[in-house]
Image (spheres, helix red, strand yellow):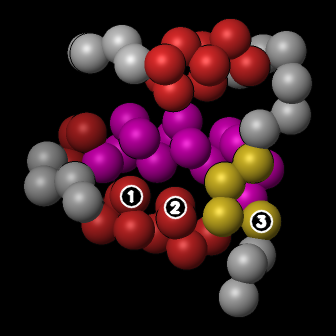
Amino acid sequence: MAWTPETNKLDTLLGSSPICVGDIVLTEVLQGFRNERDFNTAKALLTALTIVNVA
C-alpha cells in the first residue's frame, strides 16, 4: 500500500477519533471492487464506521 498524507491522517485518527463515511461514498467505493474477497474485507472494515445518510 502506498502511504499518502491522507492515509497517514486516517491511520492516526482510527481508534482515537470518531470516523464516519457517507452512504453514497460507501456505495461508490464498494462498487469499485472486482474481487469478492477484497469486497468483503472492505465492506467489513468500512461498515464498522459510522455511516451517515447524505441524501
Q: Please report the residue visible at 30 percent of the width from the left and 48 percent of the height from the top.
A: 39
- Residue at which label 1 appears: 29
Residue nearest the observer in this picture, 20 or 6: 6
Residue 52: assigned label: 3
> Magenta stretch: residue 43 in it?
yes
Is 5 on the left-hand or right-hand side of 28? right
Mark 2 touches mark 1? (CB < 8 Å): yes
**Residue type at numbered disc 1:** Val
* 7 vs 50, nearest the viewer: 7
**Amino acid under disc 2:** Leu
Disc 3 versus disc 2: distance between alpha carbons? Answer: 10 Å
Residue type at mark 3? Val
Q: Residue furthest left?
A: 34
> Residue at horizontal 54%, vertical 36%?
45
Element class at badge 2: helix
The residue stretch that appears in magenta? 39-51
Provide the residue designation for mark 2: 26
Give residue 12's quadrant in the image.
top right
